[in-house]
Amino acid sequence: MCIAYIAIAAHPDWPVFIAANRDEYHDRPARAARPWPDHPQVIAGIDEQANGTWLGVTTSGRFALITNFRDPSHKLANPPSRGALTRHFLTTTEPAHDYAVAVSRRAHTFNGFNLILGDTHGVFYVGNRQEPCLPVRLEAGRHVVSNHLLNTPWPKAQRLRQALDTYPQAALFENLDPVFELLKDATPAPDHTLPSTGVSLEMERLLSSPFIISPGYGTRCSTIVAIHASGRAIFSETSYDPSGTAIRRHDWPFNVSP
């Protein structure tokens, strides 16, 4: 996953609202989101290459998402899978804060990542390119994470934030289509605003839009997670082919249970 908008108690009726795009090589095998047969309380996709996940939620209201930190000059040899961090959190009951602390202690063994974990007691961020690498509690508000530190004002992050900050969350249960349309913003950033992350200028341009379209690498799916104060919730995912055309959508409504 390469960009996620996370609103925590930013609306009185919606304690959690997440809208995210997962960018990946198109030939990397993955399963679309669904309840996991071996853990039916978990709704998430699965990266079939490493058996982890990029974003998921449980029927008890736990959620986790992870993005890579783009830094091609610092790559570890044979590191553990970053997607395993989200998978393990979703399949256990360890409090988000305690889990975040445990991750921070071994974060140096992974390639660069940004991890966000939430449960009924709070939402926490851990980034292993942040100094010091300690969990940060996310207070009520709106946040965006892409492939740098949380709330880094990259052009793509700013575009998505501006679009979703003004979206009327009260309408979420009526129709999710407008949110998916906002996530499908393929507008590239002007060259003078591009970050310098160690990839070519051509690649910086390609990666500069919230939604990425190219034959080899691009946005594979968009996901919305919305939890209402009443306990009603929805996990919705749209998958895309290399041309950016939607090929399927799955909606998983559920009620948050203790």
Image (cartoon, rainbow, N blue to C red):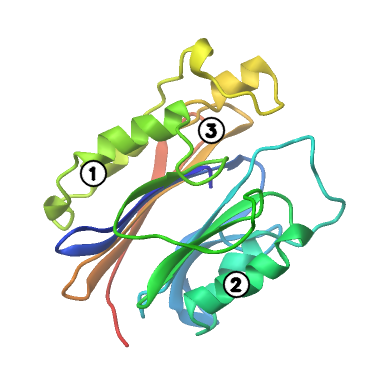
Q: Position of residue 223 (x, y in %)?
A: 39, 52
Q: Are marks 3 and 2 in contact (CB under 8 Å)?
A: no
User: Camera-side residue: 21 or 116?
Assistant: 116
- Which quarter shows the C terminus? bottom left
- Foreground disc of the pair 3, 2: 2
What residue is disc 3 on?
A: 242
First in sequence, mark 1 or 2: give its number: 2
User: Camera-side residue: 241 or 220?
Assistant: 220
Q: Position of residue 115 (x, y in %)?
A: 55, 58
Q: Determine whether the residue tagged by mark 3 lies in a helix, strand or loop.
A: loop
Q: Determine whether the residue tagged by mark 1 lies in a helix, strand or loop.
A: helix
What residue is disc 2 on?
A: 101
Q: Determine whether the residue tagged by mark 2 lies in a helix, strand or loop.
A: helix
Q: Position of residue 20 (x, y in %)?
A: 41, 47
Amino acid carrying label 1: it is Asp
What residue is disc 1 on?
A: 177
- Foreground disc of the pair 1, 3: 1
The quarter holding residue 54 reads bottom right
Circle 2 Cα neighbour tier, 10 Å, few/some/many (<14 / 14–19 / ≥20): some
Q: Are marks 1 and 3 in contact (CB under 8 Å)?
A: no
Q: Is residue 98 left or right of residue 111?
A: left
Amino acid carrying label 2: it is Val
Q: Is residue 145 left or right of residue 88?
A: left
